[in-house]
Amino acid sequence: MDVVQLQRQLVDYRTSLYHEGFLDEQFTQLQELQDENNPHFVVEVVSLFFEDSERHLNELTTALEQQSVDFRRVDAHVHQLKGSSSSIGAQRVQQVCIAFRNYCEEQNVEGCLECLQQVKHEYSLVKTKLESMFQLEQQILTAGGSIPM
């Protein structure tokens, strides 16, 4: 596949991520911060988001398995996850976190467990999609092209 085809594929793929609600304008702003002085900025920020999210998801799983659930602790992790997903533009993860926090406020264990599964699912989807996008960008660079904005 030539560079132009790869670039077109990347633009279409990125557009689909916005249309399907995986990403919002915050991700665009993140990309605008990347320049030749810091060419891996977006990948680095998103990688930190992945690490952070996995830690919070593990903590949430543990906290919700307890006999007596500490809803303040659960809410604190959900709040952190909501903030970090918002900062990279992971819109669908952020939306589930909003509902999740409402269940924490109500101290609804079933609702929290349901949201935990949803947020794990949405996180897994956005992670896979962003990793695919980064691989496509790498293919373009390897082929000698530049990343279209």
Image (tube, rainbow, N blue to C red):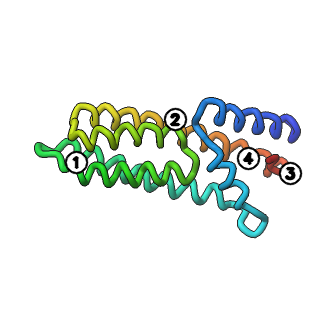
Q: Secondary structure at mark 4?
A: helix
Tell me: 93 left or right of 112: right
> Which one is in front in this view, the residue at disc 3 or the one at disc 2?
2
| Mark 3 vs mark 2, CA separation in Å | 29 Å
Q: Secondary structure at mark 2?
A: helix
Dot 2 and dot 4 residues touching (CB under 8 Å): no
> Which one is in front in this view, the residue at disc 4 or the one at disc 3?
4
Identify residue for label 4: 137
Which residue does the image show at 23% across and 31% down from the upper left?
110
Vertical position of residue 82 compared to residue 99: above or below: below
Q: Secondary structure at mark 1?
A: helix
Tell me: 139 left or right of 71: right
**Pointer 1: residues within 10 angstroms few (<14), some, or many (20+)?**
many
Identify residue for label 3: 144
Which quadrant holds residue 41? Answer: bottom right
Which quadrant holds residue 39? Answer: bottom right
Q: Earlier in the sequence, mark 1 or mark 3?
A: 1
Q: Amino acid at mark 3?
A: Gly
Q: Amino acid at mark 2?
A: Leu
Q: Earlier in the sequence, mark 1 or mark 4?
A: 1
Q: Which mark is residue 71?
A: 1
**Pointer 2: residues within 10 angstroms few (<14), some, or many (20+)?**
some
> Which one is in front in this view, the residue at disc 1 or the one at disc 3?
1
Q: Which mark is residue 125?
A: 2
Which residue does the image show at 68% across and 31% down from the upper left?
16
Q: Secondary structure at mark 3?
A: loop
Q: Earlier in the sequence, mark 3 or mark 2?
A: 2
| Mark 4 vs mark 3, CA separation in Å | 11 Å
